[in-house]
Image (spheres, rainbow, N blue to C red):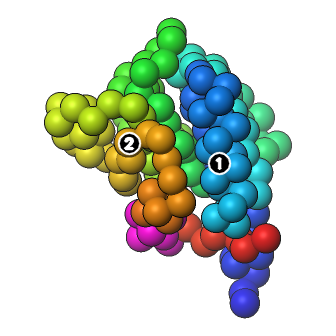
Amino acid sequence: MGEAAAKAVRILLVEDNPLDVRLTKEMLEDAKIGNDVQVAEDGQAALDYLTKMSESGLQALPDLVLLDLNLPRIDGRKLLALMKADDRFKHIPVAVLTASNKDEDVLASYNLKAVCFVTKPVDMTQMLKIVECVDDFSLRIVKK
């Protein structure tokens, strides 16, 4: 395997529910992905994190954002729109993980360039769907 395949996958999980954070992290671990998972509890915290990473230049931006739509402060819909409108962040694949299954949320997420939309609770099949969606964007997954 080449050098690119050895790169750790950096994931920003934007989720306000501690139980969902724990379950998603466990699912990522079971799927053998997510070597470096950072958590932001709301959209503002996620935007602050991305901005700090971008401005510091010391740490790379995440390779993937797992985004809940229903968040305090800045909700997931607004955060996705802000990310895709910002040249610093628009290249980062965003997978939406949410309890919502409303058609308008699905459509809005895809219109804002989300790579996939998965309804919680997330199971292994859905986690593999996320991996497949992201893999379409040439993200290399490091097997632990």
- The mark that comes first in sequence, 2 or 1, is 1
Please report the residue visible at 53 percent of the width from the left and 43 percent of the height from the top.
Answer: 66
The foreground one among 113 and 109 is: 109
Instruction: Please name the residue that numbered disc 2 is placed on.
Output: 119
Are discs 2 and 1 less than 8 Å apart at CB? no
Q: CA distance from mark 2 to mark 1?
A: 19 Å
Query: Would you identify the image quadrant in which residue 143 lies?
Result: bottom right
Magenta highlight: main SS:
helix
Crowding near the residue tagged with mark 2, few <14, some 14–19, many ≥20 C-alpha atoms within 10 Å: some
Instruction: Please name the residue that numbered disc 1 is placed on.
Output: 11
Q: Position of residue 65 (x, y in %)?
A: 55, 44
| Element marked by disc 2 | strand
The foreground one among 3 and 11 is: 11
Q: Position of residue 22 (x, y in %)?
A: 70, 37
The three-letter code of the residue at mark 1 reads: Ile
| Residue 28 shows in this picture | yes
